[in-house]
Image (cartoon, rainbow, N blue to C red):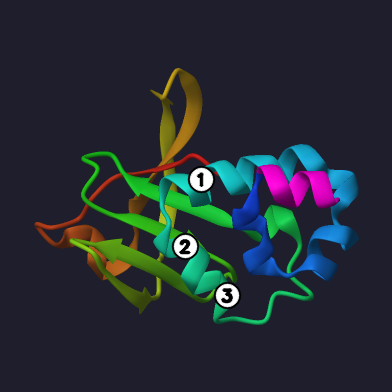
Amino acid sequence: MEELLREWPELSAFGVEWVRKWLDLRERLIVIAKVMRRYPWMVEVVKQRPMSILHPYMVEVYVAVDGSEACLSLTSSKAYCAQNGAVKEVKLELAFSRYEVYEDKIREEYRPKGLLAFTTAAREYVRPL
């Protein structure tokens, strides 16, 4: 576990006990850390919230296809999105749209659902995590 935290210090945002608890999901933890390394603001968001009961497969990240926004979802009801350097808590309601190639892998693509889908600012999101 110490080796994992040395190589991926971003995981320490979840807490040492959380990392120890989920060590058998090492590959998933590394994928989470890689995304958090790419979006450092996510580390601060995670540090500010209790993560003891969060399962690693509940952590989801959505990135706008145009690159203008990235969102971190820790629960089904809340997400934290960063746009132009500002992070805000939002209710992210997305519906699966199709599969697309993103960063050389097949990824799920989502579109906003409900009233948000009809706005001119509606973005498509790819789920890298």
- Sequence order check, earlier mark of 1 and 3: 1
Instruction: Please rate how many residues cluster around mark 2, counting C-alpha atoms within 10 Å: few if below 14, some from 14 to 19, many from 20.
Output: many
Q: Are marks 1 and 2 in contact (CB under 8 Å)?
A: yes
Image x and y of residue 127, in percent: 47, 43
Q: Nearer the viewer, residue 48 or 100?
A: 48
Numbered mark located on residue 35 in the image: 1
Q: Which residue is depicted at the point 47% across and 62% down?
A: 42
Q: Is residue 102 above or below residue 88?
A: above
Q: Is 129 in the magenta?
A: no
On the image, the x and y values in percent for residue 65 come to 28, 39
Please name the amino acid that badge 3 sits on: Lys
**3 or 2: tag closer to the N-terminus:** 2
Mark positioned earlier in the residue sequence (1 or 2): 1
Q: Quadrant of residue 110?
A: top left
Disc 3 crowd rating (10 Å Cα; few below 14, some 14-19, many 20+) is: some
> What residue is shown with label 3?
47
Mark 2: amino acid: Met
Kindly identify which residue carries mark 2: 42
Relative to 97, is 19 on the left or the right? right
- The answer for how far apart the CA atoms under marks 3 and 2 are is 9 Å
